[in-house]
Image (spheres, rainbow, N blue to C red):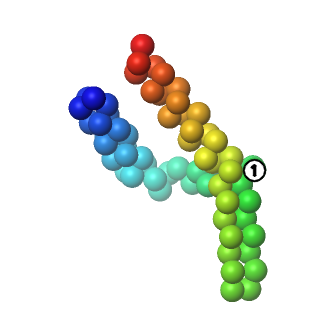
């Protein structure tokens, strides 16, 4: 369990360092963006699905 937490922490650090070059996250087709004069609504449906699948595959591979 402690190794999994360390791995997750390292992944968060890597994502934080690579964030400026990961501009595609949050701008995928399927994400809903509504902008009005003084209002902005952002619903990252497809981004959430992609991240969920990636985490599921990663955890599945670690379990093996």
Q: Nearer the viewer, residue 27 or 51?
A: 51
Give the x, y percent position of residue 28: 69, 50
Residue lying at 46% horizontally and 53% vertically, measured from the top left: 19
Relative to residue 34, is residue 44 depicted above or below? above
Horizontal placement of 29 versus 10: left or right?
right
- Secondary structure beneath disc 1? loop
Give the x, y percent position of residue 30: 75, 50
Residue lying at 68% horizontally and 70% vertically, measured from the top left: 41
Q: Quadrant of residue 9?
A: top left
Mark 1 residue crowding within 10 angstroms, few (<14) / some (14–19) / many (20+): few
The single residue placed furthest to the bottom in the displayed view is: 38
Residue lying at 69% horizontally and 80% vertically, measured from the top left: 39
Horizontal placement of 5 versus 51: left or right?
left
Task: Please identify the quadrant where the N terminus is shown.
Answer: top left
Q: Quadrant of residue 50?
A: top right
Residue 27 visible somewhere in the drawing? no
Give the x, y percent position of residue 7: 32, 34
Residue 59 visible somewhere in the drawing? yes
Relative to residue 50, is residue 26 depicted above or below? below
The single residue placed furthest to the front in the displayed view is: 1
Label count reads: 1
Q: Nearer the viewer, residue 57 or 22?
A: 57
The single residue placed furthest to the left in the displayed view is: 2
Task: Please identify the quadrant where the C terminus is shown.
Answer: top left
The single residue placed furthest to the top in the displayed view is: 64
Residue under label 1: 30
């Amino acid at each position: 369990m402690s190794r999994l937490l360390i791995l997750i922490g390292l992944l968060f650090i890597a994502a934080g360092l690579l964030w400026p070059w990961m501009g595609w996250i949050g701008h995928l087709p399927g994400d809903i963006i509504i902008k009005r004069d003084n209002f902005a609504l952002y619903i990252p449906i497809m981004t959430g699905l992609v991240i969920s699948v990636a985490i599921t595959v990663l955890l599945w591979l670690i379990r093996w």
